Every structure is written in structure tokens, then in C-alpha cells.
Amino acid sequence: MRRHELTDEQFQKIENNLPGRKGHVGVTAEDNRIFINGVLWIFKTGAPWRDLPERYGHWKNVHRRFSRWAKAGVFDRIFRILSEDADMEFLLMDGTIVKAHQHAAGAKKK
């Protein structure tokens, strides 16, 4: 598994909520997992759509499908499902980045 891709466990949790599955109205998609991994690659790397690796499909088709799913609320459902059991392992709040006014540190007022 590549580092920007869903694990088997994560994909199994969302697979029944995706368009294009067997028994669902419309065309049956063979590549829902590849497509989602491509979208994750784009958002994790911050690369433009045109730089999407070919293993995820043609960038224009992936972008078009992403736009359709986003309008239909598919990614909202996916996010809700995957965030239900977030372990918060990497949640960190660091106060050193919070900027304060100079008077907050006890500087004398003029």
C-alpha cells in the first residue's frame, strides 16, 4: 500500500456508500478505490490535477468525477464514516505558534 492511499479496512467501511457499485443506478464502476486514492493523492500532495500519476487514470476524467461526487455530497458521507472512529493519535496543539500582542507578555505600556 502506498502512503497516500486508503487501507483495506478504510475502504471496506465506505465501499457500500459509493456510487457506481453493483445494484446501484447507473454505470458500475470498476475503479472506485483507484479513483478515491487518486483524489487523496491530489489533496495530500497539493499537486495540480494535471500532475496526477497515470496509475489513477487520466487527470481530466478523475477531476470530472470528483466534481460530480462533490456536488452529490459523496465526499461528505465518506468523511463522516471515516471520522467516526478517529483515534486522534496525531492531534497536537502547540502554543508556540500562537502570536500574542506585546502587552500580553508583560511589556510596559508607554
Image (cartoon, rainbow, N blue to C red):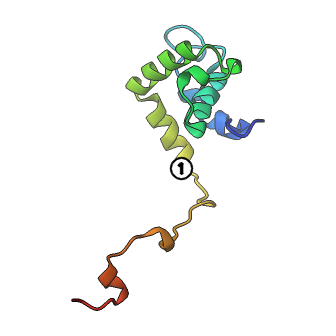
Location of the C terminus (image quadrant): bottom left
Helix or strand or loop: what does disc 1 sit on?
A: loop
Residue 85, image x, y percentages: 58, 52
Residue in view at x 39 percent, y 71 percent? 99
Residue 1 against residue 66 in the figure, above or below: below
Question: Label 1 belongs to which residue?
Answer: 84
Q: Residue furthest top?
A: 27
Q: Residue at x 52, y 36 (%)?
A: 78
Pinpoint residue 51: horizontal percent, then vertical percent.
Answer: 61, 23
* Residue type indicated by callout 1: Glu
Image quarter of residue 91: bottom right
The quarter of the displayed image where residue 29 is located: top right
Percent from the top left, x then y, of residue 81? Answer: 53, 41
Quadrant for the N terminus, please: top right
Front in this rendered view, residue 71 or 85? 71
Relative vertical location of residue 88 with respect to residue 77 in this rendering, above or below: below
Left or right? Give the position of 8 relative to 14: right
Q: Nearer the viewer, residue 93 or 23?
A: 93
Residue 48, image x, y percentages: 54, 27
- 103 relative to 58, above or below: below
Q: Residue at x 32, y 76 (%)?
A: 101
Front one among 92 and 19: 92
Look at 33% across and 80% down and name the residue there. Answer: 102
